[in-house]
Image (cartoon, rainbow, N blue to C red):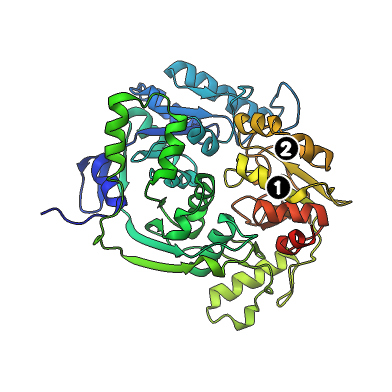
Amino acid sequence: MTHPQTLYQKLIASHTVTVLDAQNVLLFCDLHLMNEYTSPQAFAGLHEAGRGVPMPGQNVAVVSHIIPTHPVRHRVIQDPPSALQARNLQANCERHQIPLFDTNDPLQGIEHVVAPEHGMVRPGMVIICGDSHTTTYGALGALGFGIGTSEVEHVLATQTLVYRLAQNMRIRVDGVLPTGTTAKDLILMVIRHIGAQGARGYVVEFCGSAISALSVEARFTLCNMAVEAGARGALIAPDATAIDYVLARAPDITGAWRERALAHWATLHSDGDAAFDVEHHFDASNVAPYVTWGTSPDQAMAIDATVPLPAHMVDAAQRSSAEQALRYTALCAGQALQGVPVQHVFIGSCTNARIEDLREVDRIVGHRHVASGVRAMVVPGSGAVKAQAEAEGIAARLVAAGFEWRQPGCSMCLAMNDDVLAPGQRCASTTNRNFEGRQGRGAITHLMSPAMAAAAAITGCITDVRNLEIAV
């Protein structure tokens, strides 16, 4: 009799090359994604040891973090250290025959947008990358997680990874998300509830009727930000929605391969009596649009609430963190966020820069215009997303409304490129982190959904998008 397994346990078992001890296994990795800033030392170590890359086709590289996004036809990385990183990545990929989405590749983009849109991500895979938001791929039933530079070197040399086993957490969300709320609001609510370390040491499996109702792109957002609760991975069992998404982007899966794939994917779910170490249950109907008020994704609140009072927090560390966050964000305890002016709006990142996100921004903006004194940027997640948005007329309408339409890249998600906020600037952002200095030294970041960011752009302040839609 087989022991009941969670989906996570099934994926680990199917990829375990050998068991090292009770807590560690040698794990085979189906796909290894690289970017320009976590791979240089790994390649250097590889070359010093005289090793090659035995499975180059299961590695893919993307230039995304340090690349400028100015709307020019041919992009040139002006910053010398960044340009060197890009050249080194190109040279290393050429040396080892690793596919590369380089600076001016028409399909270049953010790694976590590029990989699934080109059919590289399939249910049941193990996918690793030197970037924490690799959890994104759980939306398709693939186990994705971030690794360090020394681990990148090990994967390049062996296509395997020494992996410490995680515990199992299940988060069930039933009910229907109300009008005006999205997967971004849902995950911010979950993170606020369980805390920035609430899933530390766990791989989270999301399930429930509200999860099943989400599009694949919304599921990407959900799994992408699970790491902000400390999760080592995030999974959603692949259903017809996920499988249709994959098959539409994977023309190589045909004939007998297709039948075998479908049969295998049908087994990728937690057994009915599988045991989880921790379980949470949420009602989607209680979710409102969420906005962060502090400097951690768990310092978030419903838009119709008020900033919490640190004095009422029992935990001393939590209270101290809240006090410091309010000093940094220049907000007051008990304050409402609605009406707080913003100087910048950023719509982009691996969390919210896909075509569905841009369509929602377009819908909210309508015939309105960006408010006076606000700089609003839209950075598509990839060349493919950019081309589609332009073909649908989204780009032209947003430009006419006063938005900047940029080239693909990580852009203002993090201050590693030309897109950096000035000290004291307050930004409504669709990104995944609001740490101190994340978007620029002294800059203030409020995380929110694309719809909420669009509302902020056209009103000039943090706004409840539900009220805006009623007024349309």
- Residue at position x 55%, y 65% from top? 189
- Residue at position x 80%, y 66% from top? 339
Q: Which amino acid does label 2 sit on?
A: Ile
Residue 302 can be seen in this image:
yes
Classify mark 1: helix, strand or loop. helix
Q: In this view, does 19 lie above or below 289?
A: above
* Residue for badge 1: 361
Farthest-out residue, right: 372
- Residue at position x 49%, y 29% from top? 118
Q: Residues within 10 Å of mark 1 (few under 14, many from 20)?
A: many
Figure label count: 2
Q: In this view, does 166 lie above or below 139?
A: below
Q: What is the C-alpha distance between the residues marked 2 and 1?
A: 9 Å
Res 331 quadrant in image:
bottom right
* Residue for badge 2: 394
Q: Earlier in the sequence, mark 2 or mark 1?
A: 1
Q: Which of these two is toward me, 57 or 267?
A: 267
Q: In this view, does 312 lie above or below 321?
A: below
Report whether 371 appears left or right of 354.
right
Q: Residues within 10 Å of mark 2 (few under 14, many from 20)?
A: many
Classify mark 2: helix, strand or loop. helix
Which quadrant does the N terminus fall into? bottom left
Q: Is the Cβ of the residue at disc 2 closer than 8 Å to that at disc 1? A: yes
Indicate the position of residue 350 as horizontal and vertical percent values. 57, 43
Q: Which amino acid does label 1 sit on?
A: Val
Res 25 quadrant in image:
top left
Indicate the position of residue 351 as horizontal and vertical percent values. 58, 47
- Residue at position x 42%, y 47% from top? 138
Indicate the position of residue 222 as horizontal and vertical percent values. 51, 53
Residue 147 can be seen in this image:
no
